[in-house]
Image (spheres, rainbow, N blue to C red):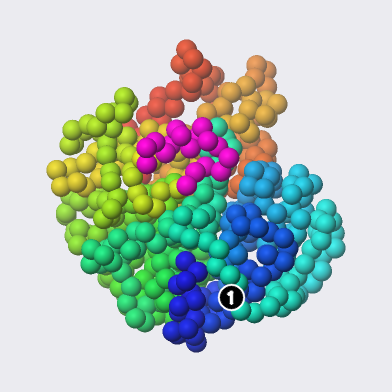
Amino acid sequence: MTTAIEFHAGRIPDHPAIVCAGRRLSYARLYREACRIAHGLRAEGLGTRARVAYLGQESVHYYEAFFGCALSGTVLVPINWRLTPVEVEHILRDSGSELLFVDRALLRTAGKVAAASPQLRTVVVLDGTAGGRDEDAEQGFGGVQDFGAWKAAQPEGAPETVTGSEDPIVQLYTSGTTGLPKGVVLAQRSLFKIRDALAEEGLDWIDWRPGDVSLIGIPGFHVGGIWWAMQGFSAGVTNVAMPRFDSRRAVGLIRDLGVTTACMVPSMLRLLLGEPAGGPDAFRALRKIVYGGSPISETLLAECLEVFGCEMAQIYGLTETGNTAVCLPPADHVPGNPRMRAAGRPYPGVQLKIIDSGGAPVPTGTVGEVCLNSPANMLEYWRRPEATAETLVDGWIHTGDAGYLDADGYLFIQDRIKDLIIVTGENIYPAEIENVLVKHPAVADAAVVGVPDDRFGEAVHAFVALRPGAQAGPRDMLEFLRDRIASFKIPSRFEFVDRVPRNPSGKILRRELRDRHWRGRDRRVN
């Protein structure tokens, strides 16, 4: 990935590379700042494959840090800025991050967990001069440095290249079935192998043209966001980001900057369509929207095609597959086409199979577990060899999704074998929430499932069984969860029950809890 911005820095030095929150960096400036960061990381004593955490909203600094880490051979660990201190602490400790880039607004969060991360030697505060010093927030750290001053002290010029396509470049944390997020380690190849396969086959499923302006709708701590951004940087186009997604602001950026291509999740598309300032005139420059992260309804898709008036391509994959492995090309986005319900078909070089519970392939049209073998597959779950062996088997990622293939090789997703809930493209595992709920003194047992929601795709629904004689309501549960898990994971609905149904071995019977909410729908994803 580093060779791409070096190439564009020489070819189109003054062309805007990244625009965010009123700041704009050219390719030459982005490369120069990334080189300084690489030198700075080495000066801090960080060797190849050392972990560097980033806790902050989208900004030009995020991409400077990403490429700086890549140039130095270190691995960037982006952290969802909406997580609670407890969740941030787990990621810092588990990753072994030795340096942290942090927004000044989030410095207090980081300070609360510093003591539990003894390997964290250096903290570099982003935009430190803008907000002034906050000495109370800096307590607990061995040393806090201002990002601008720290960079300025480093030499210019490219450091010696120390990485290749198989070397790790980013470590993204996903929620786990055990309740503890796992670090998915992706190699540099994960960010360009699909692009190269499309180019070699001459396919325009996801393509780039001179003059393209790309909107990065998905945040950089998500695999979809970093993958999409890297496609744009590799192509040498202008990339537009927002500190956080805001549909009104997004409409303005699309209109005023002439955005031609964008990547978003379905819930973002729905919000765009609801904006008063939206409409064909605002979206006239758009030529293609790539969407994924959660299933999309046929009604929403038809409305998108009508209002946006551009090509659309659906992508399907996991963090573990390096993001997209399957695509529904623009040519299949025709109202009334039954393939509009499909996730798509594999990219060139990607293998897909459907297996039964015993691991044997099933016939066409038969539902089973979706397995993917992609050249972009993850290297491993960080320090989780058993979990890696369970998910990555002989080169195949076992997705936990249930689906089938039609006679033409198109994948249709029907349900989830795993208990994953997807809310606005964010992966949420019930166990993570249940493990916190049962710590409430009034709660005897709890179960969490995903139920259909017209706005967000799914909603988190909690079933709570109270202890004998205990009294508590939804407000008590909300108050208890507020500082313990991220806000997007907090259930929007609480249902108090006498008991949580379990099988003889003690496993929660989630399907029994989910079924009545999904009754009448022909698939168990929304």
Give residue 193's quadrant in the image: bottom left
Numbered marks: total: 1
The answer to whether residue 305 is visible is: no
Which of the 4 image quadrants contains residue 197? bottom left
Residue pointed to by mark 1? 158
The picture places residue 375, in percent across and down from the top left corner, at 36, 52
Which of these two is toward me, 369 or 416?
369
Vertical position of residue 290 compared to residue 523: above or below: below
Answer whether residue 287 is magenta in the image: no
Which kind of residue does numbered mark 1 sit on? Ala
Give the camera-side residue of 430 and 36: 36
286 relative to 331 in the view: left or right: right
Asked if 30 appears above or below 75 in the picture, the reply is below
Q: Quadrant of the C terminus?
A: top left
Residue 262 visible: yes
At which x and y percent is residue 133? 82, 69
Q: Is residue 464 above or below residue 56?
A: above
Image: magenta residue range: 379-395
Q: Residues within 10 Å of mark 1 (few under 14, many from 20)?
A: some
Q: Secondary structure at mark 1?
A: loop
Q: Residue furthest bottom?
A: 14
In the rendered image, residue 18, in percent from the top left (x then y), is placed at 51, 75
Q: Residue at x 48, y 60 (%)?
A: 164
Q: Name the spot of residue 138 as percent of width and height, x first.
A: 81, 59
Q: Residue at x 28, y 66 (%)?
A: 199
Q: Residue furthest top?
A: 504
List the single residue furthest toward the left.
Answer: 407
Residue displayed at 67% across by 18% down: 469
